[in-house]
Image (spheres, helix red, strand yellow):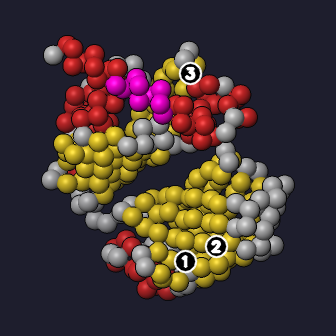
């Protein structure tokens, strides 16, 4: 489906604020009650069409989004594009939508009577900044070499790190987390590095063992820079997929938030123990 960037630009500039970041197509992903969801969003003027894939089923939503504060909001309706055996929670003809941009992150929230969905994706960045791209490359090259000290040196002293397991690490704790992970010697590959003067993105994958189980994790990373260093780092990956590899399929029958809470507590305890051991060596 072809859409006009020229027609979409006025609305998109309200969303992104910077002309060089205007775009009319976003690839988004997320989860709902443990189900992976993929979506393609197309904008043309105020009109929006969203193709949503849930497992082996799909539906299409269409409507209009209008500016409200720093977001685009509106009501979307499903059309005849439903295929496959969608669960009842998805088989509704009315969805409230909110599209928001923060840095390179695009977030789409969909809510119906029965279900809420949060989908995220990355927007096109501005003019390339080779120094920031080199910084990301230095960070992951150090990870490949299990060099946690070099990774930590890429952060500002007040860096903020977030991922599904460590949702709120600040300052030295963020660097210490990478040092702890490097001690396990994971196999790491990275690609897709792109950065402008303020934001950056990368794709990386890791293979390692946890609780005797082999883990293959696929991560999308985004960064914010300040004074030549990383001040904000967010890693996004599928927690349900990761937990099934780590603990087995039985976790699928447990409440997702309960599993996440336990994993976060265990991981925080491991990091604290690691930090205490490192302090004892000094």
Q: Is residue 266 magenta?
A: yes
| In the depicted structure, whether residue 90 falls above or below residue 169 | below
From the top left corner, tell me how far across and down residue 179 is, in percent.
30, 26
CA gap between label 1 and label 2 equals: 8 Å
CA gap between label 2 and label 3 equals: 40 Å
Q: In which quadrant will I find the C terminus? A: top left
Secondary structure, mark 1, is strand
In-image side of 236 versus 129 (left or right): right
Secondary structure, mark 3, is strand
Q: Residues within 10 Å of mark 1 (few under 14, many from 20)?
A: some
In-image side of 165 versus 173 (left or right): right
Q: Look at mark 2 in the image and give the residue it sits on.
A: 96
From the top left corner, tell me how far across and down residue 119 is, in percent.
56, 58
Whether residue 193 is visible, yes or no, is no
The chief SS type of the magenta part is helix
Mark closer to the chain start, 1 or 2: 1
Residue at the spot 43% in from the left edge and 63% down from the top edge: 123
Which image quarter: residue 198? Answer: bottom left
In-image side of 132 versus 29 (left or right): left
Mark closer to the chain start, 1 or 3: 1
Q: Residues within 10 Å of mark 2 (few under 14, many from 20)?
A: some
Q: Look at mark 3 in the image and give the residue it sits on.
A: 214
């Amino acid at each position: 489906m072809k859409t006009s960037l020229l027609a979409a630009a006025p609305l998109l500039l309200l969303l992104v604020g910077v002309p060089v970041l205007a775009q009319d197509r976003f690839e988004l992903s997320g989860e709902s009650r443990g189900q992976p969801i993929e979506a393609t969003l197309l904008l043309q003027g105020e009109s929006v069409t969203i193709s949503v894939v849930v497992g082996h089923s799909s539906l299409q939503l269409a409507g209009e989004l209008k500016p409200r504060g720093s977001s685009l909001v509106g009501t979307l309706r499903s059309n005849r594009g439903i295929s496959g055996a969608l669960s009842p929670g998805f088989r509704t003809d009315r969805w409230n939508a909110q599209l928001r941009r923060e840095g390179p992150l695009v977030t789409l929230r969909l809510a119906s009577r029965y279900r809420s969905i949060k989908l995220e994706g990355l927007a096109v960045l501005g003019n390339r900044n080779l120094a920031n791209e080199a910084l990301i490359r230095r960070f992951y090259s150090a990870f490949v070499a299990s060099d946690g000290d070099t990774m930590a040196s890429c952060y500002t002293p007040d860096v903020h790190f977030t991922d599904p397991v460590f949702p709120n690490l600040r300052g030295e704790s963020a660097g210490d987390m990478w040092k702890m992970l490097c001690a396990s010697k994971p196999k790491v590959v990275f690609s897709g590095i792109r950065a402008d003067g303020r934001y950056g993105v990368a794709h990386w994958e890791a293979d390692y063992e946890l609780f005797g189980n082999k883990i293959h994790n696929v991560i999308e990373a985004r960064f914010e820079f300040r004074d030549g260093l990383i001040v904000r780092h967010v890693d996004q990956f599928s927690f349900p997929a990761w937990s099934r590899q780590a603990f087995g399929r039985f976790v699928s029958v447990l409440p997702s938030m309960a599993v996440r809470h336990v994993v976060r507590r265990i991981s925080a305890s491991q990091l604290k123990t690691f930090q205490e051991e490192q302090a004892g060596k000094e």
